Amino acid sequence: MALLAGLACVGGITGVALRTRTTRPDDEFNPLIIHGGPATPSLSLIHLAESKLLSPIVENIRFQMFRGIDEVRAGLVGNGWPISMVPSQLAANLFNRKMPIYYMSVLTWGLMYFISRAQRITNIEQFAGSRVALPSKNDLFDQMFNYWLNKAGFHKDRDIKITYMSSPVEAAQWLHAGQVDHALLPEPQCSAAIMQSNEVPLYRSLPFGALRQFVDGDHRIPMAGIMIHQHVLDRRPEIVSKLRQALHQSVRWARNNPLAAAQASVPYFSIPAPIIAAAVEHSNLVADDATLYQSELHDYFEMICEFNSDMIGGKAPDIGFYI
């Protein structure tokens, strides 16, 4: 794998003089497909694609939704997705396993929330004796939640009961039935559960990142970012410079126009536009250059190493990961 040693400094590609060219019919990036997941950061990517913000560098650009981590892994490993929204820990894992992908921008500093049936959580001690539903056993959020609880002096089996949901709908059903006290959901599914709750009021009680703040003082989690594949850097590096600029513009637009952003995303989400629009406020959408936040990203990966380094390929990625 060719590492981007020459682009490792802060600023990276943005500091390189690049020749602009438009898309040719025989261009391998015609169309240029940007992949995103079923979460609110994709609103910015949808706007970027539909507004042709990469013109005249790229005239034909499309957004494509993926549905699961296995699809992301297969797309990056097997098909070399050129530009994609990827969970930060998966990107680090693949980079450490010699996959030529690089972290360009953080897309969100946290969009996971505990929703609660009655009690609003204001500190980690309030989890004592409660029943909590998590998305999946042994995934990042399960392991991180247990890591923070252990640091706070909790014992998983003694002090708290954790169950695992098959879907956000199931979590809402459990909350309504009183089978769990709290459930962890991402946006926009979190807003959907709260706004569509007719039987029993549900509350957005605590951001997931707040648990980290209770333990080590940091409250932000760089949950997902934009990854660039090596073949884009090799063959069309000017795309990256333009993309960085366009992404900032699209994120600002989505934050300032949540309903319009939501309406544009309806074909990709099975959630009504007003719910998606309400989720924008709680999604911490950004387009923060990875090189500028490299220290914070590194600290996050080091924290993951404290409970399961295999999740990110054995270590925090080196400086070559950030462009």
Image: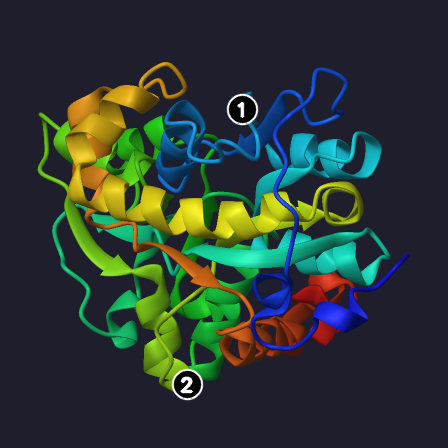
Q: Is residue 185 left or right of residue 102?
A: left
Corner quadrant of residue 284: bottom left
- For image coordinates 51% across by 57% down, the residue present is 105
Q: How many residues crowd around disc 2 within 10 Å: few (fewer than 14), some, or many (20 or more)?
A: few
Residue at mark 2: 216
- For image coordinates 53% across by 22% down, the residue present is 62
Q: Give how far across and how far down residue 316 sits, in percent.
A: 70, 74
- For image coordinates 61% across by 72% down, the residue present is 301
Q: Give how far across and how far down residue 47 sits, in percent.
A: 36, 31
Corner quadrant of residue 277: top left
- For image coordinates 33% across by 23% down, the residue present is 265
The kind of secondary structure element at disc 1 is loop
Q: Nearer the viewer, mark 2 or mark 1?
A: 1
Label 2 vs label 1: CA separation?
Answer: 46 Å
**Whether residue 176 can be seen here:** no
Which residue appears farthest toward the right when viewing the image?
1
Q: Give how far across and how far down residue 204 sits, in percent.
A: 18, 50
- Quarter of the image that includes the N terminus: bottom right
Q: Looking at the picture, tell me which residue is in the foreground, 134 or 35.
A: 35
Q: Could you tell which of marks 2 and 1 lies nearer the N-terminus? A: 1
**Vertical position of residue 94 compared to residue 319: above or below:** above
The kind of secondary structure element at disc 2 is helix
**Vertical position of residue 300 compared to residue 229: above or below:** below
Residue at mark 1: 59
Q: Give how far across and how far down residue 225 sits, in percent.
A: 52, 52
Q: Looking at the picture, tell me which residue is in the foreground, 2 or 187.
A: 2
Q: Looking at the picture, tell me which residue is in the foreground, 307 or 40.
A: 40
The amino acid type of the residue labelled 1 equals Glu
